[in-house]
Each structure stands twice: as C-alpha cells, then as structure tokens.
Image (cartoon, grey):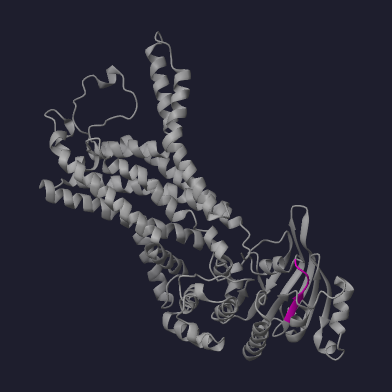
Amino acid sequence: MGLTISITSISEEDMAMSNTNHPFWVIVNKEIADYVRSWRFIILIVIIALTCMGSLYTALTNIREAIKPNDPDGAFLFLKLFTVSDGTLPSFVVFISFLGPLLGISLGFDAINSEQNKGTLSRILSQPIHRDYLINAKFVAALIVIGIMLFVLGFLVMGFGLIAIGIPPTAEEFMRVVFFLIVSLFYVAFWLNLSIFFSIRFKQAATSALACVAIWLFFSVFYNMIVNLVGKALSPSAWASDYQVIAYQRFMLNLLRFAPSELFNEATMTLLMPSVRSLGPLTMEQVHGAIPSPLPLGQSLLVVWPQLTGLIAATVVCFGLSYVSFMRKEVRSR
Amino acid sequence: MCQYVIELTGLTKKYGNFTAVNDLNLNIRKGEIFGLLGPNGAGKSTTILMMLGLTEPTSGSVNVCGINSTTHPVDVKRKVGYLPEDVGFYEDMTGIENLLYTAALNGIGKKEGRAKAEQLLERVGLAKEADKKAGKYSKGMRQRLGLADVLIKSPEVIILDEPTSGIDPAGVQEFMDLILQLSREEGLTVLFSSHHLNQVQQVCDRVGLFGGGRLLAEVELTDLHKTEHGLDDIYNQYFGGGHGHE
C-alpha cells in the first residue's frame, strides 16, 4: 500500500512539473523489463509454478485425511491447502521457504557487478541522477517483480483450491493468506538484499552468487547441525530443575532463530495454523485452563510480531550495508 | 558567464600511501578543447572522476560551471557529458533504445528524446545500425554511440577519457574529426584525455602535461603548430623519448 501511494505521489508531482517520468521510475521500469525478459526469471517462474501446482495437488488429495474430529484448526479448512502434505511432496509453505531464497538470490546476485563489468555503471552514474537511485531502483524493481509473482501464485493456489474443494475462504482465512504472502515477501527481500550486497562487494557475478548460495546452504543445512551439537554439549542433566530445562529450551530456540528460515517458518506456521498459541515452551500452569481453540488473527499476529520484526530488521541491515558500500564505492569504467 | 568552466584548486587524491593526484591547479576556459596528456597511471582518470563527483578528493576543490562537484554532483552532471574509456551499453537493447534510456534519465520527454536520438545517430553515422542490438556493435561503433549518448543531454562541457583506445587508425581519424566538428558547431568545452601525443596535438587548443599526479606544463598549441616539433620536444623533456607516437 505504502508503495503504491508513493508511486502516485511522485509521479503526480512530476507530471505537474513536466511531461516526463521521474528518473527513479525510469530505472525501475527498465529493471523490471530486464527481469521479466531474462531467461533466469522464466526458468525460475516455471520451477516455482510447477512445485506450487505439485504441492497443491498433494494438498488436495490429502485434505480429506487432514481433517480430524477434534482438530482446533478444523474450521480453517482453506488454510490447509498451504500446509497439508502426505510426506511425498512438501507443502506450499515449505516450498516457498526453500525456493524463496533462491528467487531472491537469483534476482540480485549480479545487480551491481554486472553493470560494472559491462561498463554501463559509470555511464549511468554520470547522468544527472543521485547515486542511490540506481541501487534503490534495483531493489524496488526486484521487489515489485517478486511481490507480483508471490501474490499471483498464492491467489492461484487459492483459486484452484476453491474450485476443487468448493468451500470459499472466510474473510479471516483470506487475510491470513495475505499476511502469509507479505511475510514471504519480506523473507525473499532479505535474500535479495543479501545478494545485492554481495554484488557490490564482489567484482565477479559468479563469486557473489556462490557466496549467497553458501550462506543459504549454511543456514538451511549446517546451522541446524551446529545448533544440535551445541545443544548436546549444553544439555542439562536428568536431575536439573524445571527452570534450568526451560531456560535451556529457550536458549536453543533463540539460537535457532538466528537463521532467517526459522523466523520465516515460525511466522508462517502461526499465521496459517490458528491453533498455534506460542512459539516457545509453555509451562503446565500457563496451559492450565486454556481452551484448545484457534486464535483470532490479531492475536496470531501478536505471537509472530517478534519474528516479523527480526526478519524486517535483517532485511534492513542488509540493505543498509549495501547502501553504504555502494555510496562509498569509487566508480571506474570497467 | 563564468570565464573558467572547470576550476581545480589544490586538488589532491590519495589512495592509502599512494598519491594519485597531487595538489593540482588547473583552469579550463569556456569553448576551448583542452587536452590532458600523460602516460597511463598519471592521474588523468582520477582527476576526471573527481570532476564528476564519482569519487571524493582527499583535499582541494573542483568547480564545474561554478558548481562544486563534490557537494552538488547532480547539478554538475546535468551540464557535463562524460564518455568513459571503453564505454559499455546494455547489450540486449538496441542502439537507439540505449540512447532513449539516457534521454529519459535526463528528464527529456519521449517524443523529444526520440527526435534527438535519431538526429544524433545520423550525426555519428549510426543511423543504419540504430535498431541493431548494442551487443553486436564493434568497438568503434560503440565509441561513436557513446559520443551520441554524451551529446543527447545537450551538455555544456564534454569530458572524453581516452575515447580512442582500441579503435583502428582510420576509425580514430574519423572519431577525432567528429569531435572537432561537433565541438565547434555546438560551442562546447571539451576536455580530452589521452596518452597519444599526435591525437592531442591534432585537435586541442591547449594541452596540460600530466605526470605522477602533477600538472607538469601547460602549453598553448596555436603557437606550437608553427614550430613543427614543439610539443614533441616538451613531451620528451618530461617523459623521455618517443612515447608520444604509439
């Protein structure tokens, strides 16, 4: 919303001045056109569309078994389209958490260094534009492309699901899906910014792509292993007090939360499974007397607020780093 | 309005311990073609980058048309066209699309931009190749497209950084003639950086000899043309024998 408002305000102001586009939006337009026409984007969109259709198919074939008599999420049948799987093919959510980073990385890893290597960077920056226009425009263009793509996919899954199961989503379910898509957008934006940062840092596009993939692999494969190792070393003895056990659990969970994928998973699970009421350990006293009913949307959002803030903060830190290093960069021709 | 279009005062740029440009003072008058002559690594490109605000001086100041390049780079870049050494274009866009993009970045409307781009392509002899992808252009064609790209914003000053490197001799001749013609017609101030003595001698009104980040000498070429080897002698005096004719 904020984005569309700023688009109109800038262009209106500009239209009043002259009959031309603001240079910032000229760059955004060009970048979007570049992305949409590029082979890598077409390949990515085919992969992601196929996997989403696959996960939708498994969800639809398994949705009958997924409904259990006493399931507090039973009222949210529609959300199960995004989370149900029979184990052969991952669900939509898992696919997004896996392919989202790939999408972000592939759109950003050569943002600046390819311009430098082609010799266009010094030519563009010698035009009367502020230097940050270029990097901001690249980020905004990629974000618009990713946003449109995620929302189209999400709504497609909803649409097909609607046709297949014949039960329309409630307003709350719809809002939950929209929030899920927004969280996904932030998640992909984090990886996009990270890859833009590496594209400024490294001269070769291949190096920056590799660095991004290395970080992605580290967090998706090795980080859990390392946390497990630390966990084994620190695990309290069998005679430890409850407080020690809870403190240990909290600590382990917080360690895991350094991985952006963990933040994303916690946030999306809470949003798509309204019965999730806490993301940390709960004591018996806290659970005592609670009715196993789903949370309203506002409460679910409150539960994931720290995760959301963490994701946005990580995104902003990456953007800040790339911004500063780009502004200080000396731009030589090739 | 201002007598000097480019004024450099006490300009210094250091990279760590290395001094690329050392206490440089230089004034360039309106409408003249000024040559920056010096061997590779003399600090010519660094000086040019500072004029455009693409890098910050360690000390000293740069004023272009009375505007400080370090603090107001955008205003300077509105008046200055810069053709970098070995200029690059978006290879999957055609020649004219590349020009139109530059025009749009300069806030030139679509219609006006297209008219201007076509006229300039005609001028630099690329009218036939206008709809060819820039990736298919030869080196010489790319430099000529670069010249059109520089001129599309109707600059007051153009800065050419080694514009002839990598072009064959016939192409160089053509390119130099083009620069001379265009600058005289439009009344442009031209800053021309090169390490080729004969090219500088051919087109420039005034030459600054650069070496080790310093301005070693300033020479008015009009007098020198009379004495055949005038500039040769001065060049050899500073840089040793025979470097000028590569």
Residue A178 at least partly seen:
no
Apparent side of residue A283 relative to residue A28 in the rendered image (left or right): left
- Pinpoint residue B239: horizontal percent, then vertical percent: 85, 71
- Pinpoint residue B195: horizontal percent, then vertical percent: 75, 74
Between A213 and A14, which is closer to the camera in this rendering? A213
Depicted B222 relative to depicted A273: above or below: below
- Pinpoint residue B3: horizontal percent, then vertical percent: 72, 82
Between A206 and A281, which is closer to the camera in this rendering? A206
Q: Magenta stretch?
A: B34-40
Apparent side of residue A135 relative to residue A263 in the rendered image (left or right): right
Depicted A20 relative to depicted A312: above or below: below
The residue located at (45%, 73%) in the rendering is B93
The residue located at (18%, 47%) in the rendering is A171
Callout count:
0
Looking at the rendering, in which quadrant would you find the N terminus of chain A? bottom left
- Pinpoint residue A179: horizontal percent, then vertical percent: 29, 46
Identify the image quadrant of residue A152.
bottom left
Residue B81 at least partly seen:
yes
Between A42 and B227, which is closer to the camera in this rendering? A42
Looking at the rendering, in which quadrant would you find the C terminus of chain A? bottom right
Residue A77 in the magenta stretch? The answer is: no
Apparent side of residue A131 relative to residue B48 in the rendered image (left or right): left
Depicted A199 relative to depicted B228: above or below: above
Apparent side of residue A92 relative to residue A334 in the rendered image (left or right): left
The residue located at (22%, 32%) in the rendering is A275
